[in-house]
Image (cartoon, helix red, strand yellow):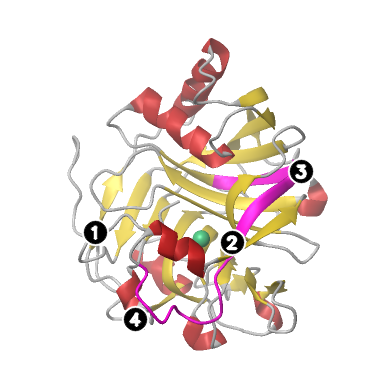
Amino acid sequence: MVGVSGRAFPGAGPRHGRAVRSGGVFPLPHHTNSPVKALLEVVTHGSTRLCPFGLVTLKVWYTATSYPKKSAPVRKWPKSKGLLFMFQVWKSLLEVYDLNTVAKDIELPGAFILGAGAASSKILGVNAELIPIVQTKSEKKPAVNGSYIAQINPADKGCLLEKYSSKYTDCEFGLLANLYASEGQPGKVIEVKANGRTGELNFVSCLRQILEKHYGEKPVGMGGTFIIQKGKAKIHVMPPEFSACPLNTDEDVNNWLKFFEMKAPLICQPVIVSRDPGFDLRVEHTHCFSHHGEGGHYHQDTSPDSVQYLGYLLPAELLFRIDRPQETHLVGRD
Ligand SMILES: [Zn+2]
């Protein structure tokens, strides 16, 4: 742990009494402009290892009017309210959470939630990647679930991407998730454009490592969305069944997952924290969807010469940890 110590997480939700067993909340430095400065500094003073893109521009935009309208999932954008992290271990395969409960637990009912997680296998009957886009319920309004799910198509073993609301009416998810919660209001966002990758790291790892390099032990969390405008990307989708044998190494996990090369435009939802303040976190997690039937978990673009990224991000004020794994492990964290 660094400087500030976490306080106990405030109670469990009514429906999922066991949902918030252990965890904590950690204040993150909230200076909207500082991460911009950090990123700019690295970009302009050049660290090609950390920022392996041919052209990177950064600026602060007010509201999201410049975002490509066709691709915007919901016309609402993260304001400065909270980064929510959740994580579950493999042994709790059947744990189920509800985004409405989570929003209440972090004292942000009606929160707008983006990020990366797993769909509830209890609801679907199979594993699926969840690309959550949810306005949770509040006293005034019912929940609006604009999420996508990506699963293996039983017919052709390809990727099957569907709107969650085309089949289900709940806001549940399972296993694990890294989520960014906001009030869903327009506000200042950081725009990042990057073209032509020249190094090994993916776009999200670059952003995270730049922040880590600049802030050192002080964790900085960010969430938002970016679009892969041109090129292709390596994306995984979980197979329908859980593995019959335990997945003990990254190699085991990679052999179990199904990998695809998917084409732009892909709309991605990154959740990152520059450094783990001692909560046993996955420090980056990005899921994506598209309007051409592809989506899943983002690993890397596969077209470094032609790739183009355009992202809008915002630093978070608070990091919540829900259900910390009882035993730590380093498998499946990229
Ligand atoms: Zn994932």
| Residue 236 located within the stretch drawn in magenta | yes
182 or 87: which is nearer to us? 87
Of discs 4 and 1, which sits in the foreground?
1
Helix, strand or loop at disc 3? loop
In percent of width and height, residue 103 lies at 43, 65
Distance, label 2 to label 3, CA atoms, is 17 Å
Helix, strand or loop at disc 2? strand
Sequence order check: which comes first, mark 4 or mark 1? 4
Distance, label 1 to label 3, CA atoms, is 36 Å
Helix, strand or loop at disc 1? loop
Which residue is tagged 2? 236
Sequence order check: which comes first, mark 1 or mark 3? 3
13 or 42: which is nearer to us? 42
Task: Determine the residue located farthest toward the top in the rendered image.
Answer: 45
Badge number at residue 16: 4
Whether the residue under disc 2 has CB within 8 Å of ligand 1: yes
| Residue 202 located within the stretch drawn in magenta | no
Which residue is tagged 1? 328
Of discs 2 and 4, which sits in the foreground?
2
Q: Are marks 4 and 3 in contact (CB under 8 Å)?
A: no
Sequence order check: which comes first, mark 4 or mark 3? 4
Q: Do the residues labelled 2 and 1 touch (CB within 8 Å)?
A: no
- Residue 8 falls in image quadrant: bottom left
Label 2 neighbour load within 10 Å: few <14, some 14-19, many 20+: many
197 or 87: which is nearer to us? 197
Q: How many marks?
A: 4
Badge number at residue 271: none
Name the residue: 50% across, 65% down.
255
The amino acid type of the residue labelled 1 equals Thr
